[in-house]
Amino acid sequence: MSALHHGRRTPVPTVPRTRDTTEDGWRGWVARRPVTAFLLLALPLGWAVLGVPALAYHGLLPGGQLPVEVFALALTVLVMLPAAVWVVSVAEGRAGVRRLFARTFRWRFGPGWWAAVLLALPVGTVVLGLLSGRSLQTADLPSVLLSGTLAALLPLFLVNLWEETVWAGFVQVHLERRHGLVAAAALTGVAFAAIHVPLSFAEEFTASSVLLELGFVLAVALLFRLLAGIVLRGTAGSVLAVAVLHAVWNASNSEDSIVDDLLSGGQPVLFAVLAVALLTAVTAPLVRGRGTAEQQETGTSSVTAR
């Protein structure tokens, strides 16, 4: 295991476990390989769920063009979250599950981090759009801001909070124990992109269009998971902070979102990606030398590199 200290990976104390990982059999293997066990459960089941709208769109199942959002919600609350909770219960017992959900609802962290997760991406996206020559649509501005904010709240509590309980609170935190911040973010990004593969087939597609879309999703996932890892460290492991960031990211890049309504010239995806990159660069130095989320929870700290 390692942590970032002045840009270098350094050994860190082991976080106490609540279960004996030398237990034999399936449960013992799950306790020793919790992330692998989760992915073996979540990926095939997730592909089956997200594959339904793709198969229906192409006439292989009845239903025609089904709403993808419904299946994304089902993936989160019926597949990923139960799988993660079960794996944590096997690996770390009830205490581990309590720690997981304590991260989910942790809201006490600095006002600077609250400002960052709430405002940095939409404001940064708008500013970058204006610098590129787009104009700000100010007609009925209060209504646009209010409706856009309310539109972001529903997916935050229905999907993003539970989705990030899995990806940030479980997968990324566990991977960081062994691999450090950057590698944990990269591995989580690959898994995040992988589970969403069937969505690339829920419309008309060609081989090149699928490869292009998957490449873009993977690139954005890698960048966003790095920012999520930084936010986790900066907020002492708050999944709520990462979930808010995720909801705000969606509101900054999606069609008909609050930022899309504010900027002229079409969907602001490129500006939103650049805003994520800038926020990552600005916040990364702020967490240098801080322990992982688990170290901050348990009061342990990283060992200084020698």
Image (tube, rainbow, N blue to C red):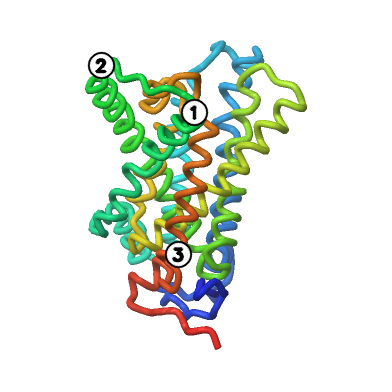
Q: Which mark is on residue 285? A: 3
Q: Residues within 10 Å of mark 1 (few under 14, many from 20)?
A: many
Amino acid type shown at disc 3: Pro
Total tally of numbered discs in the picture: 3
Query: Who's the residue at 52% across and 39% down the image?
Result: 273
Q: Residues within 10 Å of mark 3 (few under 14, many from 20)?
A: few
Q: Position of residue 239 (x, y in %)?
A: 36, 53
| SS assignment at label 3 | helix
**Residue, disc 2:** 140
CA–CA distance between discs 2 and 3?
39 Å
Viewport quadrant of the C terminus: bottom right
Using the rendered view, name the quadrant where residue 25 is placed: bottom right
Query: Who's the residue at 28% across and 51% down the image?
Result: 114
Amino acid type shown at disc 1: Pro
**Residue, disc 1:** 268
Q: Looking at the image, which is closer to me, 90 or 238?
A: 238
